[in-house]
Image: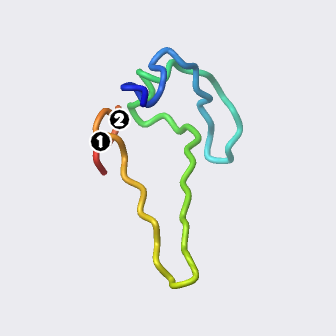
Amino acid sequence: MNSTPHDPKEIIAIVDENDRVIGRHVRKNHAGGMLHREVGVLLVNRLGEVLVQTRDDKSMGFPNF
């Protein structure tokens, strides 16, 4: 597995409250209250068990969360 979950030089979209792109920023500097798109997945099997995804310990924000 890659030791870096994301390329810190990747350009990400900065969005407003209505998810309209209002700018772009380098991923490694995306903190500071700027809104950006994220994805979350919730998996539930037939037994009602939920798969809980944890963040990598090398994540830039909230590692191991």
Q: Which mark is residue 59?
A: 2
Q: How many marks?
A: 2
Question: In the rendered view, would you say 31 is above or below 38?
Answer: above
- Position of residue 64 in the picture relative to residue 49 (left or right): left
Asked if 54 appears above or below 37 in the picture, the reply is below
- Where residue 63 sits, quadrant-wise, is top left
Residue 39: x and y in percent read: 57, 48
Q: How is the image coloured?
A: rainbow
Q: Residue at x 34, y 37 (%)?
A: 61
Q: Residue at x 62, y 36 (%)?
A: 15
Q: What kind of residue is marked 2?
A: Ser
At horizontal 55% and vertical 37% (from top left) the residue drawn is: 36
Label 2 with label 1: CB-CB less than 8 Å: yes
Rendered-image quadrant of the N terminus: top left
Q: Nearer the viewer, residue 17 or 12?
A: 12
Q: Which residue is mark 1?
A: 63
x%, y% of residue 59? 35, 35
Give left or right: position of 8 versus 43: left
Q: Position of residue 34 (x, y in %)?
A: 48, 34
Q: Residues within 10 Å of mark 2 (few under 14, many from 20)?
A: some
- Tell me the SS state at disc 2: loop
